[in-house]
Amino acid sequence: MNSLQASNISVQLADRPVLQDVNIAIRPTQVHGLLGPNGAGKTTLLRALAGLQTVDAGQVQLSNQPLDSIPASRRARQLAYLPQGTECHWPLLACEVVALGRLPHRAPWRSVPAHDAERIEAALREADVLHLADRPINSLSGGERARVLLARSLATGAEILLADEPVAGLDPSHQLQVMALLKARASAGGTVVVVLHDLNLAARFCDQLTLLNEGRVIAQGAPESVLAPAPLQQAYGIRAWYGEVEGERLVVPLMAKD
């Protein structure tokens, strides 16, 4: 199993510190959630873990090897990155978009082999978009496009999936479905890093959490410790109500008292 970690990484963008001395270790078979207010550095951290953002200090390692020393073709087979947003400029069919996830495994100008076709169909089914396979992606709703793009990442077959707000814009049913899918993939031997804003989803589906604020890690560990009153107050300026329904943990954000 591939491990992923960042040691003392710092990133500056437009001469502004975005990440400062961040340490994070992503364990196989777990869902690791990245939390924090807007502008905390979550997306920058995820991009650094994917090798898409150069770090100014520190190092990212994949299975104890510097990430920037790994050839891009090999890295693309080991890491799948799902960015924010669902904008698509080309009227490709949904199945063609998902097929792009198999490019790291295919020689140039070759037709789609049978085993790739099977993986593409499986990814469409996992993301609950098989019924949309023959629809142009730019004819789909934002939520439908988001699930097609998730299927593209799943089709890669990478052990590590880095997903930036994959449930944003989805209805409650599909939010739960996507999070359950990510949890199942981790439990089956994969590794998932996911940026979230929903504290309930983080509490219910994540094994480990990293809470960022102003580019620094202010809490890290199991959900019950990271979502405790003090870290939430420090990061978001909120308090919370804690409860349990049918064995599921609930964290309800509340405005801070004056």
Image (cartoon, rainbow, N blue to C red):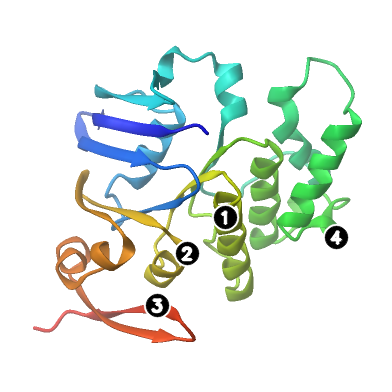
Decide: is 225 above or below 21: below
The Cα–Cα distance between marks 1 and 4, rounded to whole angstroms, is: 21 Å
- Mark closer to the chain start, 4 or 3: 4
Name the amino acid type tagged 4: His
The Cα–Cα distance between marks 1 and 3, rounded to whole angstroms, is: 18 Å
Whether the residues at callouts 1 and 2 have beta carbons within 8 Å, the answer is: yes
x%, y% of residue 226?
25, 62
Q: Residues within 10 Å of mark 2 (few under 14, many from 20)?
A: many
Decide: is 253 above or below 55: below
Q: Is residue 43 left or right of residue 128?
A: left
- Mark closer to the chain start, 3 or 2: 2
Marking on residue 182: 1
Name the amino acid type tagged 1: Leu
Marking on residue 131: 4
Report which residue position mark 3 lands on.
249
Decide: is 112 above or below 167: above
